[in-house]
Every structure is written in structure tokens, then in C-alpha cells.
Image (cartoon, rainbow, N blue to C red):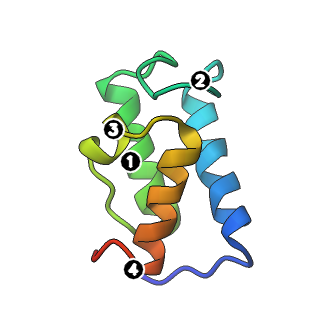
């Protein structure tokens, strides 16, 4: 499955919107700092896969410092820069 985005900004915005749809108060800090739990993590990982076609892991999410960091990881996965 291949997805094309006009800009990296579009993809980062998509990931941020998905993150905030699950954690309305989670716009700063880690996913768990924003109230994320295992169910919301699975939902986010599944939504990213559905929208972007890349499989992110719990480790990708759990070690991300904030939504921007996670979005950068998704961008790397989409562009193939992380070896996926």
C-alpha cells in the first residue's frame, strides 16, 4: 500500500490529528503523559497503519518524546528511512 502526501507537513498534521483525537489534552509530552493507555495506543497505531500504510510499534510510541517526535518516526517509516 503506497500513500503520497503533498508535504511532510501534511503527514505530520495527520499524525497530530490522530493523536489528539485519542488524547484531546495530549498535545505536549509523551503519549502516556497525555493520558494514553494500551487501548488508545492500539487505536493510534492502527489508525496510522490505516492512513499511512506503515506498521508502527508500541516501542515507537512509548519512546517518542511527544507527538512531533512520533510524527517524525511515522514520516521516516513512510519514506523508508527507518528500514521498514
Secondary structure type for disc 3: loop
Q: Earlier in the sequence, mark 1 or mark 2?
A: 2
Marks 2 and 4, how far apart in space? 27 Å
Write down the residue under mark 3.
Answer: 63
53 relative position to 56: left or right: right
Q: Quadrant of residue 4?
A: bottom right
Q: Earlier in the sequence, mark 1 or mark 4?
A: 1
Mark 1 neighbour class, 10 Å CA radius: few under 14, some 14 to 19, many 20 or more: many
Is mark 2 in CB contact (under 8 Å) with mark 4?
no
Horizontal and vertical percent position of residue 30: 47, 27
Q: Earlier in the sequence, mark 2 or mark 3?
A: 2
Marks 2 and 3, how far apart in space? 15 Å
Secondary structure type for disc 4: loop
Is residue 53 at all visible to an observer of this figure? no
Is residue 72 at all visible to an observer of this figure? yes
Secondary structure type for disc 1: helix
Marks 4 and 3, how far apart in space? 20 Å
Marks 1 and 2, how far apart in space? 16 Å
Residue at image position (40%, 39%) is 43
Residue at image position (37%, 34%) is 41
Write down the residue under mark 1.
Answer: 45
Write down the residue under mark 2.
Answer: 26
Amino acid at each position: 500500500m503506497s500513500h503520497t502526501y503533498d508535504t511532510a507537513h501534511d503527514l505530520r498534521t495527520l499524525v497530530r490529528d490522530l493523536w489528539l483525537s485519542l488524547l484531546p489534552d495530549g498535545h505536549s509530552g509523551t503519549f502516556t503523559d497525555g493520558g494514553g493507555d494500551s487501548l488508545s495506543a492500539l487505536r493510534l497505531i492502527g489508525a496510522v497503519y490505516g492512513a499511512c500504510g506503515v506498521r508502527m510499534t508500541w516501542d515507537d510510541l512509548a519512546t517518542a518524546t511527544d507527538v512531533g517526535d512520533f510524527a517524525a518516526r511515522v514520516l521516516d517509516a513512510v519514506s523508508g528511512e527507518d528500514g521498514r
